[in-house]
Amino acid sequence: LTPKQLSGKKIVMTAGPTFEPIDPVRGITNQSSGQMGYAMARAFAQAGADVVLVSGPVALATPLGVTRVSVQTAEQMRQAVMREIAQAQVFVGVAAVADYRPLEVAEHKLKKTASVDSDGGRTITLTPNPDILAEVASLPAAPYCVGFAAESQNLDDYAEAKRLRKRLPLVIGNLVSDGLGTADNCVTLYDETGRYPLPPLSKPVLARRLVDELAARLNKA
Ligand code: C5P
């Protein structure tokens, strides 16, 4: 029996959107189907890794052999990640985490006419969410951290800036027009040695390719 590529590795990852409540029936969220993250979780498990998938609300089945922790908010996602991260060799942040959440969450459903602004509008004050990936990457014994960058323009600049700012060994970037909610995705890898564009691939095929890319880098790290 030959050992698999990622045997003995614990991988903690996030996927899907977060949902930040405004009141018991409303909230703000990001557009994310979770397909890419779930495809990667499946590929990691098939490569022999012990995978903990911290997932926001998505309509997807948990891949075989993957331990899923379901959360709603960024803060819950952060806490679930921090509970698991000490034993992990790899962290992959695929989730589309909401950058902000409502400062106050109303206990009861807000009535349409209550406390509107003078112009008839309504103001929701937002407060920043924790950056889970940056926090994990700055831990004293940080695992190998992989980030995603989904941008609508200037992909190279933004992805490289993200890699440096969050101090990530590897960033996987795509233009949202190439991957959001679609079956295929076209990504470019950014690491300290350069940029590596991959051809358009279906998400399951791309996930397996990313396992190869990650395993090769872990062997060197
Ligand atoms: O800063 P930006 O959201 O564009 O960075 C994207 C990367 O950072 C993704 O890997 C995403 O999962 C992660 N992230 C995070 N926590 C946040 C925001 C983004 O882990 N609050």
Image (cartoon, helix red, strand yellow):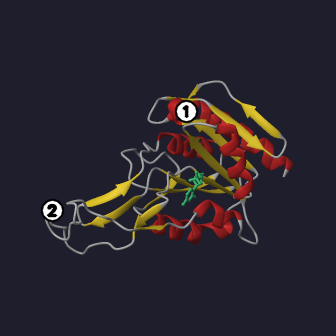
SS at mark 1? helix
Residue at (71, 30) in percent of width and height: 197
Q: Residue at label 1? A: 204
* Res. 6 in view: no
Mark 1 burial class by Cα count in 10 Å: few <14, some 14-19, many 20+: many
- Locate residue 72, reporting x and y percent: 39, 61
Q: Choose top left, top right, bottom left or bottom right for residue 50.
A: bottom right
- Residue 104 or residue 216, whichever sits in front: 104
Picture disc at residue 155: none
Q: Give the vertical position of 110 relative to 7 (above or below).
A: below
Q: Is residue 54 left or right of residue 123?
A: right
- Locate residue 97, reporting x and y percent: 49, 56
Residue at (68, 40) in percent of width and height: 211
Instruction: Determine contact: label 1, label 2, CB under 8 Å.
Output: no
- Residue 159 or residue 5, whichever sits in front: 159
Q: Is residue 9 left or right of residue 94?
A: right
Residue at (71, 57) in percent of width and height: 165
- Locate residue 157, reporting x and y percent: 70, 42
Ligand 1 location (quadrant): bottom right
- Residue 98 or residue 69, whichever sits in front: 98
Mark 2 burial class by Cα count in 10 Å: few <14, some 14-19, many 20+: few
Looking at the rendered image, the quarter that the N terminus falls into is: top right
Choose mark 1 or mark 2, whichever is in front: 2
What amino acid type is highlighted by mark number 2? Lys
> How many numbered marks, from 0 up?
2
What amino acid type is highlighted by mark number 1? Pro
- Locate residue 112, reporting x and y percent: 15, 62
Q: Residue at label 2? A: 112
SS at mark 2? loop
